[in-house]
Amino acid sequence: MPYVYTEKFALRIHECDAYGHLNHVDYFHFMQHIAHTACKAIGWSRERFMEMNMLWVVRTSHVEFRKPLLFGSEITLQTWVATVRQSRSIRRYRFLNEQGEVCAEAMSEWILLDRKTGLPARIGKEFITDFYESGDMSIVEGESNARPLRFDFDSPPDCAHLYPARAGWRDLDVDWRINNVVYVGWIGICGLDVLEAYNWPFQRQVERGFGIVARDYDIEYLSPAALGDEIGVYTWVSNVRRVSAERRYVVMRKADGVCLARARALWAWVSLKEGKLIPLPDDFYADFKKNILTG
């Protein structure tokens, strides 16, 4: 069996949004944190990887949101390694509330890099064995359904909304790289900015009695940003359904137009009073027509 690491957290106020729910960006913070503590718990600390001149970076992440996690409650987070192949490791995560209900499931694809060359490094068998209580290697040798999504877009259409950002000092992690969650944060702020731009800020949504919540979220990292980079975050709607819409995002470096990351999120409309899905309001749809990619 794979080694399942479990840790409990009490949700703090700065980790929650205006609705008192765990902010979707902070799911990624928790995933990053527990990936490191799970490794450290079985003797594979960051320091050990540094001695081996190796570094783990995230290639893709996916989160499926099922039920909100509420401010002040204690949550349980579980993680385990699903597959390991050459330099790639897919790690799964599960978020549970105090009642033991699974409120979110997630997956990240991690790549092991050589610190000196920046190229992928082969994952050693001793690392794999340590992550499986039985030492059974069959789970990593066979096919797995843990397959991360790959996107087919890397440039924004004409209808996209632009939010400008900048890679600053506070965005660096302990390895002097722009932290992977920072990209999710840029995308989140871009999502708020486009609501303001189309005259649908949170205040207006609350007055109308609805909120917009994430159902699932995917992000793929293509190239690292550097300290001081001027960033353009673009977003547009690609698919509108009765109670939900898919929004796409591209994070680009302004200097050379390189696509650094791309993402998609499925957003749904929910009644604040009943907590149930509701149809997309007609006037909301009409106001956002210019931001919708047709065809």
Image (cartoon, rainbow, N blue to C red):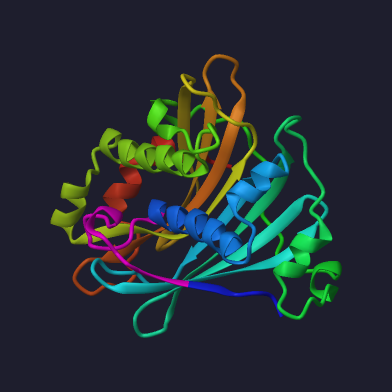
Question: Image quarter for residue 10?
Answer: bottom left
Q: Residue at 72% x, 46% y: name it.
A: 112
Looking at the image, residue 181 lies above or below residue 232: below
Expressed as whole percent of the image width and height from the top left, the position of residue 214 reads 41, 58
Q: Residue at 77% x, 69% y: name it.
A: 129
Expressed as whole percent of the image width and height from the top left, the position of residue 227 reads 49, 23
Give the quarter of the figure containing the C terminus.
Answer: top right
Looking at the image, residue 238 lies above or below residue 278: above
Q: Is residue 9 left or right of residue 108?
A: left
Q: Nearer the viewer, residue 41 or 188?
A: 41
Looking at the image, residue 11 lies above or below residue 254: below
Q: Residue at 34% x, 64% y: name it.
A: 279
Question: Image quarter for residue 291?
Answer: top left
Q: Is residue 217 left or right of residue 151?
A: left
Q: Which residues are magenta?
A: 7-24
Total residue callouts: 0
Expressed as whole percent of the image width and height from the top left, the position of residue 243 reads 40, 63
Q: Residue furthest bottom?
A: 99
**Magenta highlight on residue 17:** yes
Give the quarter of the figure containing the N terminus.
Answer: bottom right
Q: Answer yes or no: is residue 245 visible.
A: no
